[in-house]
Amino acid sequence: MIALVKRDLALAIRAGGGFGLGLAFFLILCVLVPFGVGPEPALLARIAPGILWVGALLAALLSLDRIFQFDYEDGTLEVLATAPLPLEGVALVKALAHWVTTGLPLTLAAAPLGMLLNLPAQAVPALVLGLALGTPALSVIGAFGAALTVGLKRGGLLISLLVLPLYMPTLLYGADAARRGAAGLEASTPLLLLAGISAAAVALMPFVTAAALRMNLR
Amino acid sequence: MSHKYARKGHSSNRQRCAGFHGPPLSAMRIGMEFTVTDLACRRGELTVLSGVGFSVLPGNALVLRGPNGSGKTTLLRCLAGLTPPVAGRLSFESDQVAYAGHADALKTQMTVQETLSFWARVYGAAHTNAAIERFTLASLLTRRIDTLSAGQKRRVSLSRLVLSGRPLWALDEPTVSLDTNAVAQFASAVEAHLASGGAALIATHIDLGLRDAQVMDLTPFRADVDHTTLDPFLSEDAF
């Protein structure tokens, strides 16, 4: 399993791996929004938590179809399914690799990019903590969507439709935590709920993902 | 209809391979017969094969024949555990089957060495020497997969069978894109596997020149399905 994590990360970083795709998208969004909204620092500060969370969510969504598609197309997924590794483990590792290449960089980049959006400094801890707790859920839920559509050519649109409703709780609590942080309020309730969503998703989704993969490999 | 093969020269086979350095097949697995009884498999919603029965002894190979669409791939995928059987019994678990399908399952951005090490770790093989030796990959180790020819990729892909350490090889058209030399090399790798107490099921259209290989035609096991009710394209006599 560790070998699989290493391989997936190595593949993501090498040419054509798509590492940084989500990050670049996130960066572009945060740079463009101030131009689009206009020079109103107060307005920007108010919408910044929401923009950052929506950006993180869309950036994660952007690279979902890569999670299983390449392995499916070149036959690797079949070999992995018949290998001694449990398919649930493979699903979890793939989601983990997706998180390391998208969720983690987004979390780290959120604080500097928040400055571009005039995010109040006191909101930063809640925003970063919220992203750290919430993005794992985005990756494991997204892996499930990717597994469902793995046999389809250009299943990207379908993944979005399948996965976006499942992303709503994460988005609501994540943006709420950042807003409360910005207003100087206690943010522990939404953060705990985010942690709960991620914990449940990490525990349960690999089984559903593996079942979906088995269906698609038949 | 069932095929049964006599055990022949098995003990001498084992002696002959005393110097073989491959990953050892676990002791309990050696000497086990691979029997399939009254198996029915499907592809998608369509039951393609039914009543398939055969038995392969360790040290033997069974070559599957039949025209395109006769269910060779379906049978091998079923035995590998990718598709659950519709009916019938297998005397072995799918974790004893090393499956090699049409696709090479290689990552173009990785080198041959990295590929072999990765799969060795997945299968828990101690080293990659046996795989490198059997498919003469030593000169290719530092090359990236995307710089290899189709035949070289095929060899790397097939070397994974050796790494798996599994006793039953299920091979789907393994010699596609191999030249005459590489086919002979592949045949000798299969024979070395058989000599070490393994078995092989090979779907192929060409003669591999394997000694003692049995041949089974899958056409008689073709499930009697009215395809026209299932597939609108077939009803138009499209084929």
Image (cartoon, coloured by chain):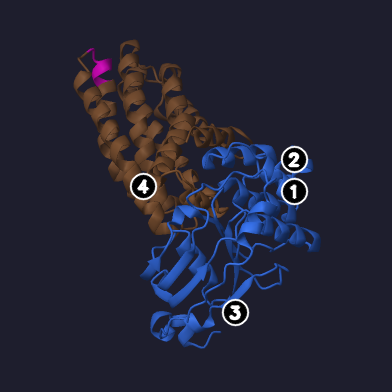
Chain colours: A brown, B blue
Comparing labels 4 and 3, the label whose residue is closer to the camera: 3
Give SS at disc 3: loop
Q: Is mark 1 on a helix, strand or loop?
A: loop
Specify the subunit that label 4 lies on: A
The one of B21 and A37 positioned closer to us in this rendering: B21
Q: Are marks 2 and 1 in contact (CB under 8 Å)?
A: yes
- Residues at discs 4 and 2 both on one chain: no
Q: Earlier in the sequence, mark 2 or mark 1?
A: 2
Asked if badge 4 and badge 1 are on a common chain, one would say: no
Query: Do tag 4 and tag 2 residues touch (Cβ < 8 Å)?
Result: no
C-alpha separation, residue under disc 2 versus residue under disc 1: 7 Å
Q: What is the secondary structure assignment of the residue under circle 4? A: helix
Q: Seen in the image, is A218 located left or right of residue B114?
A: left
Q: Mark 1 lies on which chain?
A: B
Question: How far apart, in angstroms, are the residues tagged by discs 1 and 3?
Answer: 31 Å
Q: What residue type is labelled 1?
A: Leu
Residue B215: horizontal and vertical position, in percent?
61, 75
